[in-house]
Image: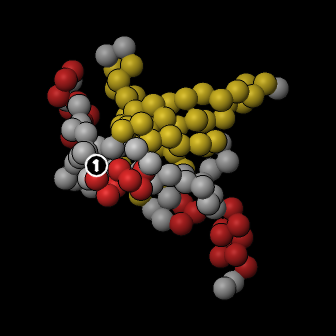
Amino acid sequence: MNLVDRLQRQQMKADLPEFEIGDTVDVHVQIVEGDKERIQVFNGTVIGRKGGGINAAFTVRRIVQGEGVERCFLIHSPKVVKIVVKRKGDVRRAKLTYLRDRVGKSTRVRERKLETSQKAEAGE
């Protein structure tokens, strides 16, 4: 392994949850305003993932006051404090960009039902 690969492996986070396209997640982001720091939660539906390794990123979409808001996050960024999966989505596509054209209840994604073996692993 060369030096660049070793440095990238050191920077990658090890305690990431498993999340996929269609899942509803809470992304805790560190915000710096002047000399103050705070954690802000951005919750929404994951509509896409791209890249791999240290450059892996995902896009989260939510509706705020009737307007769609999307944010892209680098998974291994130090600004992303943690990612919490709220519910699993049952989708059949790799990218959910069609949600940009939807309004109201049609923006909902079906929830994936866990099988009994998966429930036992999740501790439910």
Look at 17% across and 28% down and name the residue there: 106
Residue 2 drawn at (x, y percent): 69, 83
Look at 65% across and 76% down and name the residue there: 5
Look at 65% across and 69% down and name the residue there: 9
Q: Nearer the viewer, residue 106 or 69?
A: 106
Q: Determine whether 43 is above or below 51 in the image.
A: above
Q: Is residue 2 left or right of residue 86?
A: right
Q: Determine whether 54 is above or below 90 in the image.
A: below
How crowded is the residue under tag 1: few (<14 C-alpha within 10 Å), some, or many (20+)?
A: few
Q: Is residue 79 left or right of residue 67?
A: right
Residue 96 can be seen in this image? no
Indicate the secondary structure of the residue bearing disc 1.
loop
Residue 116 drawn at (x, y percent): 28, 53
Residue 78 drawn at (x, y percent): 67, 48
Q: Nearer the viewer, residue 110 or 62?
A: 110
* Quadrant of the snapshot with the C terminus: top left
Residue 92 drawn at (x, y percent): 19, 53
Q: Quadrant of residue 105?
A: top left
Badge 1 amino acid: Leu
Outermost residue, top direction?
A: 65
Q: Is residue 119 left or right of residue 97?
A: right
Residue on which disc 1 sits: 114
* Quadrant of the snapshot with the N terminus: bottom right
Look at 32% across and 58% down and name the residue there: 117
